[in-house]
Amino acid sequence: MARTPVDGLPLHRFAVPLPRWGRTMDQVPAIQRLKSRPQFLAAAKGVSQARGAVVVQRLDRGDGDPVIRVGFTATRKIGGAVIRNRAKRRLREAARALVPLHGVPGSDYVLIARMGTADRPWERLLDDVKSALTRLATPRTAPEDAPPSSRPPTSAGQDS
């Protein structure tokens, strides 16, 4: 194991950078698991971000509780049980490393495995999850000077 030059403590090979927003490790919010179907369905109503081999959904609960809840899923479309379980294990490890640092307190996250999640190089999977989490953490605002939809209105029920 590599040693850090400052404190001489061992550094894990999957170590992640210092927390965002100036958090220290004792200020990291608690992490819980999403386990029931209604919790997953509620998170699906929030915003989502697809990056590489993962889709991340986020729902701001708005209940004032700073706990971050995380759930994991993989459909049969990506492969058999062995592949799905491997993909979910990899997503759990990525979430364990990145959600405390880049997640928004008071949010529910669902990480959905996509094709290639089980085979993607670890560094690229971490990058996918990190970029999705940081994108979901930044609030999106519509530009004020943006023109309305450029699509012309369609007439419903008329055949030309």
Image (cartoon, helix red, strand yellow):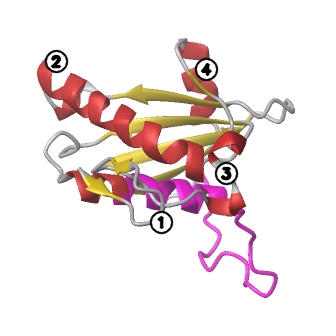
Left or right: residue 25 versus residue 14 is right
Residue 137: x and y, percent? Answer: 64, 57
- Amino acid residing under circle 1: Ser
The single residue placed furthest to the front in the displayed view is 8
Q: Which mark, residue 81?
A: 2
- Amino acid residing under circle 2: Ala
Helix, strand or loop under label 4: helix
Q: Cβ–Cβ below 8 Å for labels 2 and 4?
A: no
Distance CA(mark 3)–CA(mark 1): 64 Å
Give neighbour class at mark 3: few <14, some 14-19, many 20+ (Cα, 10 Å): few
- Of the image marks 1 and 4, the number of the one nearer the N terminus: 4
Give neighbour class at mark 2: few <14, some 14-19, many 20+ (Cα, 10 Å): few
**Between 51 and 120, which is closer to the camera in this rendering?**
120
Q: Quadrant of residue 156?
A: bottom right
Is 24 situated above or below 32? below
Q: Residue at x 73, y 84 (%)?
A: 146
